[in-house]
Image (tube, rainbow, N blue to C red):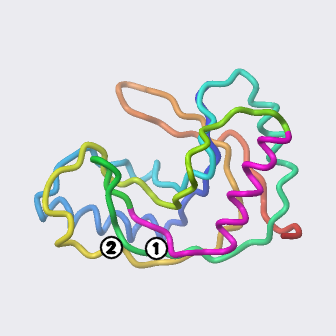
Amino acid sequence: MRLFIAIMLSDDMKKSVIGTMHELKKADVRGSYVPAQNLHVTLAFIGETKDAAAVKAAMQTISCKPFRMAFADMGVFDNLLWVGIKGNQGLNKLAKYVTTALDAAQIPYDRKKFVPHITIIRNMGGPWKKVSPPKGDMTVKKVSLMKSEQKDGKRVYTEIFSVDLGGKG
């Protein structure tokens, strides 16, 4: 199964991103818009694995205090449009704790540099800079293990495990 570890957005943050997505559509920004239920911040992409139990066990070793997370600007990676997250010590610590736990459990994952963002459009084209980024913030209280699969030609993310934050950190 294809897995990743993420922070799922609060309903208010999702609504703000959806509002920005509607503005982008009005501005004639084309592409494959990410469904609202799939909006998230990836902490670690694991990819294909048969050992979800090992990932769950590794996640249970994460100890981090809840923290605030807020939107920043928008930007692009190649043809992906994303919403950035404001520089955040809590978020950077959590990402480091996640990768440290995966390393300790010898679980392979994508080792790209952590750039906190929320992908909103794939294969994007059009005048996206005319639209203001969403506004909002939330308290991050949990980390989710997500399963990614194709269903009826669409990418579906399902939470299969989560860890509440509240420990040391």
Q: Is residue 90 magenta?
A: yes
The image shows residue 82, relative to residue 151, as above or below, that is below
Find residue 160 and name its label: none
Residue drawn at point x = 80 percent, y = 47 percent = 59
The image shows residue 19, relative to residue 126, as above or below, that is below
The image shows residue 163, relative to residue 137, as above or below, that is above
Screen quadrant of the N terminus: top right
Residue drawn at point x = 74 percent, y = 30 percent = 52
Q: Earlier in the sequence, mark 1 or mark 2?
A: 1
| CB contact under 8 Å: marks 1 and 2 | yes
Residue drawn at point x = 87 percent, y = 67 percent = 167
Q: Residue furthest top?
A: 50
Q: Amino acid at mark 2?
A: Pro
Q: From the top left corner, tell me how far across and down residue 133 is, in percent.
A: 33, 73
Q: From the top left corner, tell me how far across and down residue 93 is, in percent.
A: 72, 65
Bin the neighbour count of mark 2 within 10 Å (Cα to Cα): few under 14, some 14-19, many 20 and up: many
Q: Is residue 162 left or right of residue 13?
A: right
Q: Which residue is mark 1?
A: 71
Q: Which residue is mark 2?
A: 133
Give residue 154's quadrant in the image: top left
Q: Is residue 127 left or right of residue 49?
A: left
Main secondary structure type of the part rendered in magenta = helix
| Element on which disc 1 rests | strand
Q: Amino acid at mark 1?
A: Phe
Q: From the top left corner, tell me how far across and down residue 125 is, in percent.
A: 17, 51
| Element on which disc 2 rests | loop
Q: Nearer the viewer, residue 140 or 81?
A: 81
How many numbered marks are there? 2
Bin the neighbour count of mark 1 within 10 Å (Cα to Cα): few under 14, some 14-19, many 20 and up: many
Residue interval drawn in magenta = 83-104
